[in-house]
Image (spheres, grey):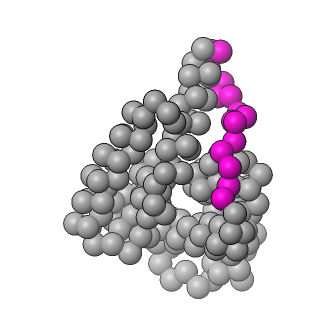
Amino acid sequence: MPNHHEFDTIYQAYYSKVFRLCAGYASGRDEWASDVGQEVFITVWSKLDSLKDPKALPAWIYRITFNTCMKRLKDNKTEVQANDTLPDISYSPEEASEANEMLKKVYRALEHLKVEEKNLVLLMLEGIEHEDMAEILGLSRSNLRVRMHRTRDKLKKLMDNERL
């Protein structure tokens, strides 16, 4: 069983990242993302002793996050609706409004992507290393590069769509 200090350190380092990934699947709905994020860390706590290579921790946590989100979405069998009241970012009122609108547009665009594409975009937004992305998604590095290129193009077209 992991010690509390070790787990607290992991929780502090990864909670915001896990929350953002969950929020991406929930179209920005904070309550859902928070619930799933807590579920992720329950799993991390219970299985931390099974992690053999500490260097694999980030990829391992992201994998648990994806699996938990996919399971929760499948169990609910309901589509999470986009949140129209995303929190403002602490910028000037004009910048906050613009950032809020852009974030809403990103979430709406993500809803038009396949699950595999959404996974890829969320990992790219988190700045995950390509090697870790390939491992998390179960892809070869060359296949990952091809999918990244195609997904970026598709996301750009969706973002350019005025109806989003």
Tell me which secondary structure the magenta stretch mostly adopts: loop
Q: Nearer the viewer, residue 164 or 99?
A: 164
Q: Quadrant of residue 147?
A: bottom left
Q: Which residue is at 68% across, 28% downward?
A: 88
Relative image position of residue 102 (x, y in whole percent): 53, 31
Q: Is residue 148 above or below residue 106?
A: below
Q: Is residue 147 above or below residue 45?
A: above
Relative image position of residue 118 (x, y in whole percent): 47, 57
Q: Quadrant of residue 130?
A: bottom left
Q: Which residue is at 26% across, 59% downward?
A: 145
Q: Which residue is at 42% across, 34% downward?
A: 161
Q: Nearer the viewer, residue 17 or 28?
A: 28
Q: Nearer the viewer, residue 154 or 36?
A: 154
Q: Is residue 35 above or below residue 42?
A: above
Q: How many marks?
A: 0
Relative image position of residue 33 (x, y in whole percent): 70, 55
Residue 164 shown left or right of residue 43 in the figure? left
Residue 14 shown left or right of residue 78 in the figure? left
Which quadrant, please, contains the N terminus?
bottom right
Q: Is residue 10 above or below residue 52?
A: above
Residue 103 visible, this angle: yes
Relative image position of residue 53 (x, y in whole percent): 47, 78
- In the displayed orientation, state which residue is furthest to the left: 142
Residue 5 visible, this angle: no
Magenta span contains residue 82? yes
Q: Which residue is at 28% across, 72% downward?
A: 140
Q: Which range is magenta? A: 79-93
Magenta span contains residue 116? no
